Image (cartoon, helix red, strand yellow):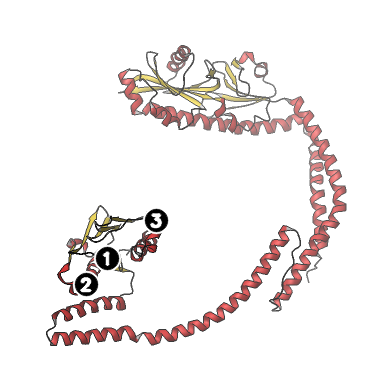
Amino acid sequence: MKHSTTLRKRLMLYFLIVMLLPLVVFLSFYIISGDRTIEHILSDQAALLIDSDSQATAGVMEKYRHKSYLAAQDASIQSILRAQTKPQRTVSSLYNIMEGDTYLASLTIWTKDGEMLTSTHNPSESEKEMEEIREILPQSNKEWVITIDGERMENGHQIAFTILRRIRVDGEIAGYAVINVYTGALTPVLAGDGFFSDLFLVDRERGKATSLMRIQDFGSTSAFPALADGENIASRPVPGTGLMIAGIISQAELESSIHKIVLYMIISLAVGFALSLVLTFLFSRSISRRFSLLSSGMKQFEKGDFATALSITGISEFDKLSKTFNSMVKQLEVLIAREREEEAKAAEAERKALESQLNPHFLFNTLSTIKALAHLHGETEIDTITTKLGKLLRYSINNHTPNATVKESLDLAESYLMIQRIRFGDRLRYTITCPDELLPEITPRLLIQPLAENAVTHGLEGKTGIWEVNIKVGRECEMLLISVQDNGLGFNVPDDFQILVEKGHTGLYNIRRRLELRYGSSFSFAIRSQPGKGTEVLIGIPLSKEGDDNA
């Protein structure tokens, strides 16, 4: 049998382990690694950081190298280079290419003859920048180079590196794209700027270096003794470029900081351990007591006591547990009562449903009898109206699918309109237009007939003169278009469709809501109406042949 202990004992043990474990691990590590010098530890850490910074720098350079490629391929830039005419204002595509990075870098377009055509900034020392292009780019067999040579300040920003790229028009060199990337684009992604005393981008081939942490430090590598000595330096090549990134390690300062940290940590751990001995007992007793109360309440509930309620302790976590438990007990009690009530209602509803199944069939059979008598006595209008009404009733009884073809929907609308025409006589006129190829298309059930009913009920009743209802079905691209138009009273269409319900147009609101639930955003629903000028409802739904998976 598994041995069990109380919660209080376990909590006391866990508290002591949590306090002792960091102290033991730290002291063990410090003793075991005593043969390793701080210099080795710093070198390992510096190597990890400089590797990370090398990859991060390569990522930033690749980002802006791609922007220079976009500039070289941009049609508007090639156009002004072909015309060799300086535009009156900056070409907008420059800002599109930079994508909001103009506070981190600048993009300037030069002609091959040394004229600056357009720029995202006001470039300073433009002649020296062109000299840099003529000096560096021809020496490379690539279409682009990344350099740290030249002036390192522009509009108050320190330039970290520059990307030079040829722009060809019709196969010939027509100009150059120059992107000056500021140190602000690099420093946020560098992991070693808090570890190294300084970080440099170095071009050993040209003997140039620029500091990424001190704006004023750039120039020849010989001007930086730390780089020249090669000691206490961690460096890595920047992949894909001829540059390297170097970090200067300040060993004396870091050694002092580490010794202080070790001392402070030992003192803190010792004080914490002493306090833990006193506080562990108090904390564990306080927590275990509340768990005991929670356990007691659950045991009472397990026995079927729904009057069980846990008290509030004043500790938010335990209070949440207590409130959740109390709420769960109440909900279970309500659910049990509701389930019993629903079982009784379900039995009653089933009984009533069985009794009411005969009613629609009785009404349909009665209509069939009336139709037969009307036909026997030559009452054509009664014969027609019972036929159409029977069709409407048969559709509501027998069709339980959510879909209908356009033909079925139009036949249903025509049956309704024929009944209304017999009722109102020649005052009501209607037309139904639909290409034959659209008749098999699938629509939601009861889509067109409610629109026709809405037109008669809300649009035409109360209007003097001739009533007209025109139903048209067509297509546009992959959309099935349905239009129901009347020349009735019209109304002011609200911006919020919810108001349609308040104005009595529940049918229109329900149709739009059904379409929204079925098609999401892939449908259109519009109402065009003005008081005294009639109403037109326009619906557009995706085409779907009968038998498709979407039907």
Circle 3 SS class: loop
Does label 2 or label 1 sit earlier along the sequence?
A: 2
Q: Mark 3 and mark 2: span between their CA atoms?
A: 31 Å
Q: Which residue is mark 2?
A: 420
In which quadrant of the rendered view does residue 330 lie?
Answer: bottom right
Q: Nearer the viewer, residue 534 or 47?
A: 534
Horizontal side of 399 relative to 318 (left or right) equals left
Residue 353 drawn at (x, y percent): 41, 84
Q: Residue at x 65, y 34 (%)?
A: 48
Circle 1 sits on which residue?
448
Residue with the mark numbered 3: 496
Circle 2 crowding by C-alpha within 10 Å: few under 14, some 14–19, many from 20: some
In this rendering, the answer to whether 150 lies above or below 454 is: above
For discs 2 and 1, the disc positioned in front in the rendered view? 2
- Mark toward the start of the polypeptide (3 vs 2): 2
Q: Residue at x 64, y 70 (%)?
A: 328
Looking at the picture, how far across and down is residue 501, in whole percent?
Answer: 38, 63
Q: Amino acid at mark 3?
A: Asp
x, y percentage for residue 396? 30, 76
Q: Residue furthest left?
A: 378
Relative horizontal placement of residue 310, taking residue 440 as reference (left or right): right
Residue 330 appears in view: yes
For the residue carrying disc 3, how many other residues have a C-alpha within 10 Å: few (<14), some (14-19), or many (20+)?
few
Disc 2 element: helix
- What is the CA distance from the residue labelled 1 to the residue labelled 3? 22 Å
From what the image shows, is residue 438 above or below residue 41?
Answer: below
Residue type highlighted by circle 1: Ile
Q: For the residue marked with disc 2, what is the amino acid?
A: Gln
* Label located before the other in sequence (1 or 3): 1
